[in-house]
Amino acid sequence: MGAIELSIAQECLRQARYSFNLGLIITALSAGVSLIGSGLLLSGKVL
């Protein structure tokens, strides 16, 4: 493999890793908000 192909492959990997991390962060935030919301509903602090 040439240097150009290698750098393209590395860039693809970097972007995939970035997208995966972003997805993971968004999923974790969503889960946290859901847990806090259900906790508030169950404790009767909302409504």
Image: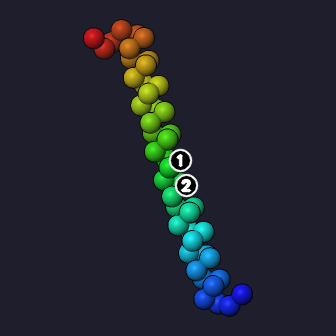
- Residue 9 lies, with reference to residue 4, above or below; the image says above
Element at label 2: helix
Query: Which residue position holds label 1?
Result: 24
Query: Which mark, residue 9?
Result: none
Residue 14: percent from the left, percent from the top? 56, 69
Q: Looking at the figure, which quarter contains the N terminus?
A: bottom right
- Quarter of the picture holding the C terminus: top left
Decide: is 20 above or below 26: below
User: Residue at the right extreme?
Assistant: 1
Q: Which residue is drawn at 61% across and 75% down?
A: 10
Tell me the amino acid under the disc marked 2.
Phe
Q: Name the residue under label 2.
A: 20
Circle 1: element type: helix
Q: In this view, does 13 lie above or below 42?
A: below
Residue 45 appears left or right of 28: left
Q: Are marks 1 and 2 in contact (CB under 8 Å)?
A: yes
Q: What residue type is disc 1 on? A: Leu
Residue visible at 50% across and 49% down in the picture: 23
Q: In which quarter of the image is residue 13?
A: bottom right
